[in-house]
Amino acid sequence: MGYFYDTYMSHRRDQWLRSIYAIEVQTSGNWHRGTINKKKIENDTLVILATFPTLDSVTCTIDASRLIDTRGEVAAYQQRKIEKVEGQGTMIKLTIPIYEVTA
């Protein structure tokens, strides 16, 4: 058993989820803000689905993604190369586990 109660951890996950305001992806050095279509909690994991309609009509390489919190700060950042072609939709699914690790 961990130090924190399950109800407390559930409450903290809810707070984390509410604090996520936007998702952005980087292409050719420019950041593009997506539309968050769904935010939910599955067990101990935050699940966020976002689409990027402004990128649908272009061929590009997505170089990175980041989460923006309600204060406007970058909460998370990840570099990852994703190649897409013109006419292909762009959807990002983020899964962020939040749980207590006991030693």
Image (tube, rainbow, N blue to C red):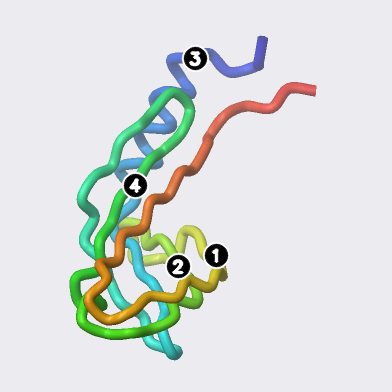
What's the amino acid at mark 2?
Ser
From the image, state whether disc 3 or disc 2 is nearer to you.
Answer: 2
Distance, label 2 to label 4, CA atoms, is 13 Å
In this view, the mark in front (3 or 1): 1
User: Callout 4, which amino acid?
Assistant: Ile
Identity of the residue drawn at 44% across and 89% down: 29
Marking on residue 78: 1
Of mark 4 and mark 1, the one earlier in the sequence is 4
Few, some or many C-alpha atoms within 10 Å of disc 3 (few <14, some 14-19, many ≥20)?
Answer: some
Number of the label disc, if any, that sits on residue 6: 3
- The answer to which of marks 3 and 1 sits earlier in the sequence is 3
**Which of marks 3 and 4 precedes in the sequence?**
3
SS under mark 4: strand
Question: Looking at the picture, does residue 47 appear above or below residue 30?
Answer: above
Compared with residue 97, is residue 74 higher up or lower down, i.e. above or below?
A: below
Question: What is the spatial separation of the Cα atoms under label 1 and label 2, in whole angstroms?
Answer: 5 Å
The three-letter code of the residue at mark 1 reads Gln
The residue pinned by badge 2 equals 65
Contact? badges 1 and 2 (CB < 8 Å): yes
Residue 54: image location, x then y, percent:
20, 77
The quadrant holding residue 50 is: bottom left
Circles 4 and 3 in contact, beta carbons < 8 Å = no
Q: Can you give x and y, in whole percent of width and height, for residue 6 in the image? A: 49, 14
Cβ–Cβ below 8 Å for labels 3 and 1?
Answer: no
Q: Which of the two labelled residues, at mark 3 and mark 2, occupies the earlier sequence position?
A: 3
Q: Tell me the number on the disc at residue 56.
A: none
